């Protein structure tokens, strides 16, 4: 295996297990001084941050296929916005949020894959869990691309004053070229939030469109995946996984 590949894998492990950033700057999000419009803006950005990141091509794993890996997502946030300044404990939000995750996928018959993620914001009690159901209606071949549709769900946990859930639907396409498989997709995320602090803030239901592009590089059982998500909040993710 090339030294560069090993260096990239090592870097992902270091980021995942040593990062100390969290989007709340502590163990909770402060909603006390927030107006309804600010809560709506915060809800949309938090929802996009915790929304499902597939980090996988459209092609299915196959009936015997199994994939497990670790990944990290960096989300650029509106750190200069008043709603973030009010939301964090010290009033000084970071420029980006880092979420390390565990990601598992299992192939099923008929081009169907099931997936699940779990994340913990370093240094906090804040966590994230979610799942996906993907159907590759075109499995792909040497000459033709694979195409799939995916439904996903995520939920935020460990935040006392805020409940947040997301539902996603996207379509993606991919084509392998030897060990490299580029992919791209377009979808929508529906975000629902609720404050639990008794502040009188109304529940928020909003949505956003996401475009994502990525590539998977695989040697034997080891894979490296890089993905960029473009929406109101931009996110960049990396994954190291073992699949068979």
Image (cartoon, rainbow, N blue to C red):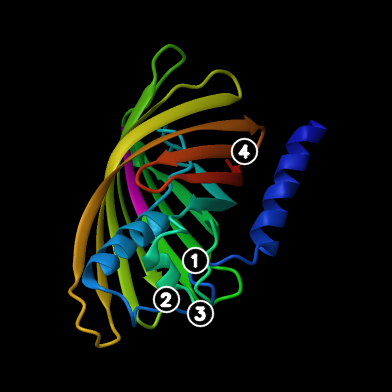
Residue found 61% across the figure and 74% down from its top: 123
Left or right: residue 104 compared with residue 211: right
- Looking at this view, name the residue that lies furthest to the top: 143
Sequence order check, earlier mark of 2 and 4: 2
- Whether the residues at callouts 4 and 3 have beta carbons within 8 Å, the answer is no
**Disc 3 target residue:** 27
Residue 230 drawn at (x, y percent): 40, 39
Neighbour class for label 2 at 10 Å: few (<14), some, many (≥20)? some
How far apart are the two marked residues, 2 and 4, measured between alpha carbons? 35 Å
Check contact, mark 1 vs mark 3: CB within 8 A. Answer: no
Query: In this picture, is 210 found above or below 204?
Result: above
Please provide percent x and percent y for residue 147: 33, 28
Q: Which residues are magenta?
A: 132-136
Give the mark nearer the N terminus: 4 vs 3. 3
Q: Which of the 4 image quarters holds residue 217?
A: top right
Per the image, label 2 sits on a secondary structure element best described as: loop
Residue beneath label 1, please? 23
* Cα gap from disc 1 to disc 4, whole angstroms: 28 Å
Which is closer to the viewer, label 2 or label 4? 2
* Magenta stretch, main secondary structure class: strand
Q: Is residue 50 left or right of residue 226?
A: left
Provide the secondary structure element on which disc 3 rests. loop
Mark 4–mark 3 Cα distance, whole angstroms, equals: 33 Å
- Asked whether 112 or 45 is in front, the reply is 45
Check whether the beta carbons of the residues at disc 1 and disc 2 lie within 8 A of each other.
yes
Query: Splitting the image into 4 quarters, where does residue 174 fall?
Result: top left
Residue that carries the numbered disc 2 in the rendered image: 29
Residue linked to disc 4? 223
């Amino acid at each position: 295996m090339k030294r560069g590949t090993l260096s990239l894998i090592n870097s992902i492990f270091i980021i995942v297990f040593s990062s100390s950033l969290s989007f709340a700057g502590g163990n909770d999000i402060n909603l006390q001084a927030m107006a309804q419009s600010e809560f709506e803006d915060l809800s949309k950005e938090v929802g996009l941050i915790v929304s499902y990141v597939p980090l996988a091509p459209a092609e299915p794993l196959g009936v015997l296929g199994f994939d497990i890996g670790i990944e990290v997502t960096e989300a650029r946030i509106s750190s200069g916005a008043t709603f973030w300044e009010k939301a964090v404990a010290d009033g000084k939000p970071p420029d980006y949020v880092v979420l390390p995750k565990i990601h598992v996928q299992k192939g099923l018959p008929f081009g169907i894959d099931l997936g699940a993620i779990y994340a913990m914001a370093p240094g906090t009690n804040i966590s994230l869990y979610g799942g996906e159901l993907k159907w590759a209606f075109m499995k792909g071949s040497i000459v033709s691309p694979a195409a799939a549709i995916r439904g996903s769900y995520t939920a935020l946990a460990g935040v006392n004053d805020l409940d947040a859930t997301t539902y996603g639907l996207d379509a993606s396409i991919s084509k392998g070229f030897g060990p490299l498989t580029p992919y791209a997709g377009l979808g929508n995320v529906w975000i629902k939030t609720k404050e639990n602090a008794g502040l009188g803030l109304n529940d928020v239901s909003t949505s956003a469109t996401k475009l994502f592009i990525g590539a998977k590089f695989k040697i034997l059982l080891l894979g490296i995946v890089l993905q960029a998500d473009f929406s109101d909040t931009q996110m960049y993710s990396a994954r190291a996984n073992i699949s068979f």
